[in-house]
Amino acid sequence: MTDTGDTATITVHGTVAAGFEGVREEFAAVLAADHTEPGSQLAVYHRDRLVVDLWAGEGITGDSLPSVYSSTKGAAHLVVALLIQDGVIGPDRTVASYWPEFAAEGKGELTVRELISHRAGLIWADGGFTIEELADDRVIAARLAGQRPYWTPGTENGYHALVIGALTGEVVRRTTGRSIQEIFEERVRAPYGLDFHLGLPEELEHRHVGVRPGVATPEQAAEAAANPIDLDGLMALAFGYASDPPLDLVALGNSRAVRALGPASVGGVGSARGLAGMYAAAISGLAGRPALLTPETVAEVGRVRWRGTDVVTAAIDPFALGFEAQQQVYPALGDGAFGHSGAAGSQAYADPVSGVAYGYTRRRFALPGGAAPENERLSAAVSSAVAKV
């Protein structure tokens, strides 16, 4: 692997394997052009080999542990995929067959497959949630069991931004007696040595780097002023913007309670190595251990079954089996690529066709939210490098 160094006005640290020098150059270029000082990490595995391990920015090292928001959902959905693979959870059984209380308010026929694909209509609860409540998946699940859905369950896709991990987590708890966090630790994080935590131990707290608020460009500020969020719409509900007071997503990521409990929708803390390593473990194996998922399960988790526009975010065909479908976002990826982005700008995915597992983090909140735009250039650079090796 080759050492990195100064490029333009930014110092890039870390290493890349031969043939991946272009990824380092692109990483330096996109960060040099971002005057908000994002503080970023990028890690890529090709099959089971770490080929990119880069970081840059004030206070950031390769071992820093940022809050990764909804990239956490990838860990939660991996646990569900493992339990489906094991035959413990039946994806086409109703949620209520595992969790009887869920049948309230007309939700009795919704299947697990529909739930994990964001079709339940349970994007929020009457009265909202505090940050302390959002830290606890069991509190969220108990509230939502009796909640009237915002659309007829099973008829629409709509991103359950802050609650999907609690909903699927309750199914996991009812079938196994264990939480998603416990199973992730025992079957994924610990055996594969991943620096990605659903519940950050106190002794690792010093490695966490706090989330910094986003800095809008003049163009973004003008766009926000011209098109304010509809506080009566589903987007405002799903992200807590309609709450009183509105949910502060930066404070959510900086909450010790959230980091300690690791809620399965948004509470994960990890490095880019940890994110990429999880997806490498899923499709290729890692650290001398076999792949977590069989080829059949890999194909299933990457398959989009319901086409259409997300009624919360307006994204097109967004979800496979819980994971975000990736090819329409990053066209160079193979069919069936799956992963999940996070609000501050993180992105992580697996591309089973090329054997790539990708992880990106940043501590400065990327506006307007979701995967930071630089991921498009970085992902393309990775795909270009892999095509030549």
Image (tube, rainbow, N blue to C red):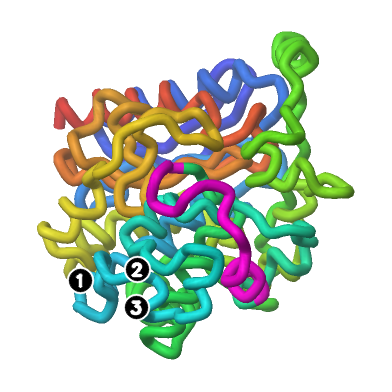
Can you identify the residue that label 2 sits on?
A: 80
Q: Residues within 10 Å of mark 2 (few under 14, many from 20)?
A: many
Q: Nearer the viewer, mark 3 or mark 1?
A: 1
- Residue in the image at 45% along x and 79% along y: 99
How far apart marks 3 and 2 lie (CA) works out to 12 Å
Q: Which residue is mark 3?
A: 187
Q: Position of residue 225 (x, y in %)?
A: 80, 15
Q: Nearer the viewer, mark 3 or mark 2?
A: 2
Q: Report helix, strand or loop for mark 1.
A: helix
> In this orientation, which residue lies closer to the viewer: 356 or 228?
228
Cα distance between the residues tagged 3 and 1: 13 Å
Determine whether, in the image, residue 210 is placed left or right of residue 161: right
Residue holding disc 1: 85
Instruction: Kindly identify the amino acid type of the residue bearing the numbered disc 1.
Output: Gln
Q: What span is colored magenta in the figure?
A: 139-157
For numbered disc 3, what is the local secondary structure?
A: helix
Magenta segment, prevailing SS (helix, strand or loop): loop
In the rendered image, residue 156 lying in the magenta stretch gets the answer yes
Does the magenta run of residues contain 336? no
